[in-house]
Image: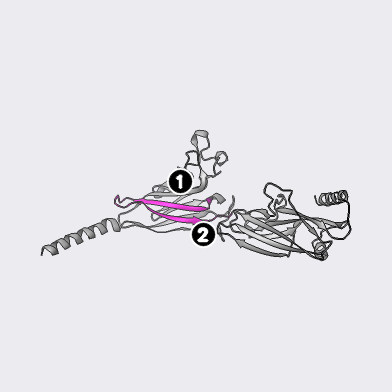
């Protein structure tokens, strides 16, 4: 009998604890309506579609939301307070729906007059006035207007309700926003030495191979790398191999076979049995970005020069010829 009473007492405590603590509100899921993968990111720019982040809530009878907080951090960016930079938007009621975020993060130092002015923000150039609260009875949400590449990353919602016995609930949303890829020739290594070139000799062989490597970084979505000679429209049909690394970096290696026919096909001019051309690459990210903008000179090029016949010229003649060829392409 004593054992039965003890058992009933313990069971009563368990049931009371379960009712009091286990049946608190919950977040069913955290989602974004667009930008949910690196391959299909949200578009970026002033006129791009806004992004809607949501944490959907399940409340018990009598419960209601008292805190809706969104936090987005910038990895490896350190703010004036020596902490990792972050933005933080806080709302409390449905009446906050449509209000612009009053950023309570640390990316703007009010003491320097940079609050909410991305032009004065030395850390991320982030404009938190693009963030607007979306509040309903069961949704803790945030709208990101004019999405920017700096919006990429983890957004975390924190929610509290009016039950003091239930702790803060949270969910993470992984967001991807388009970012234009940056390319560079990485083989030969041209870092810090733009004068590096590739020399070939067709005077003793009917065909030679030119090997080069192009690396594209920071691109969302990851690009296809396109190789060309002299002009981006003059694409090459050499054998190329492209790989994508875990961080989204794309590396393309090309082996370009050169002979008299290919030089002619690519429009490479020869003078006194000498020739030169620029071998370049650019990132193709579909219609997210314009790969062929005329107002930007592509830095991802390496000069290829060589001989195409058996005729031997003096050193000075070689220099004059190469200079003439290079100047003719400027």
Image quadrant holding the N terminus, namely bottom left
- Image location of residue 6, percent across then percent down: 15, 61
Q: Is residue 161 left or right of residue 322?
A: left
Image quadrant where residue 253 sits: bottom right
| Colouring style | one colour
Q: Is residue 80 left or right of residue 182?
A: left
Image quadrant where residue 123 sits: top right
- Image location of residue 109, percent across then percent down: 50, 37
* Secondary structure beneath label 2: loop
Span highlighted in magenta in the image: 151-178
- Does label 2 or label 1 sit earlier along the sequence? 2
| View extreme (left): residue | 1
Q: Front-most of 118 and 310? A: 310
**On screen, residue 280 above or below 130:** below
User: Which residue corresponds to mark 2?
Assistant: 36
Q: Is residue 146 visible?
A: no
Number of numbered markers: 2
- Image location of residue 147, percent across then percent down: 55, 51
Q: Which mark is residue 88?
A: 1
How many angstroms separate mark 2 from mark 1 (CA)? 21 Å
Q: Front-most of 4 and 56? A: 4
Please report the residue visible at 56 percent of the width from the left and 56 percent of the height from the top. 247
The stretch drawn in magenta includes residue 159: yes
Q: Front-most of 163 and 206? A: 206
The stretch drawn in magenta includes residue 219: no
* Secondary structure beneath label 1: strand
Q: Which mark is residue 182?
A: none
Q: Residues within 10 Å of mark 1 (few under 14, many from 20)?
A: many
Q: Residues within 10 Å of mark 2 (few under 14, many from 20)?
A: some
């Amino acid at each position: 009998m004593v054992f039965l009473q003890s058992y009933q007492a313990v069971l009563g405590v368990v049931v009371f604890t379960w009712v009091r603590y286990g049946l608190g509100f919950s977040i069913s899921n955290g989602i974004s309506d667009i930008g949910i993968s690196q391959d299909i990111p949200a578009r970026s720019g002033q006129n791009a579609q806004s992004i809607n982040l949501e944490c959907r809530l399940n409340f018990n009878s009598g419960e209601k939301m008292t805190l809706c907080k969104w936090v987005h951090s910038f990895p490896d960016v350190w703010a004036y307070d020596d902490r990792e930079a972050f933005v933080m938007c806080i709302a409390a009621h449905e009446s906050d729906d449509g209000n612009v975020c009053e950023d309570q993060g640390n990316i703007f130092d009010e003491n320097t007059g940079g609050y909410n002015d991305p032009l004065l923000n030395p850390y991320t150039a982030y404009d938190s006035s693009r963030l607007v609260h979306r509040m309903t009875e069961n949704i803790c949400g945030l709208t990101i207007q004019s999405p920017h590449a700096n919006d990429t990353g983890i957004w975390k919602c924190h929610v509290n309700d009016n039950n003091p016995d239930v702790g803060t609930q949270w969910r993470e949303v992984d967001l991807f926003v388009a970012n234009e890829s940056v390319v560079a020739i990485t083989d030969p290594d041209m870092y810090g030495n733009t004068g590096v070139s590739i020399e070939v000799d067709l005077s003793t062989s009917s065909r030679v191979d030119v090997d080069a490597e192009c690396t594209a970084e920071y691109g969302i979505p990851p690009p296809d790398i396109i190789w060309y000679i002299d002009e981006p429209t003059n694409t090459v049909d050499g054998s190329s191999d492209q790989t994508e690394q875990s961080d989204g970096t794309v590396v393309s290696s090309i082996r370009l076979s050169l002979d008299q026919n290919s030089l002619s096909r690519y429009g490479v001019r020869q003078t006194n049995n000498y020739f030169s051309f620029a071998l370049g690459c650019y990132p193709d990210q579909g219609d997210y970005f314009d790969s062929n903008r005329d107002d930007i000179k592509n830095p991802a090029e390496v000069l290829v020069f060589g001989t195409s016949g058996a005729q031997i010229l003096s050193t000075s003649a070689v220099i004059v010829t190469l200079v003439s060829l290079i100047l003719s392409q400027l």
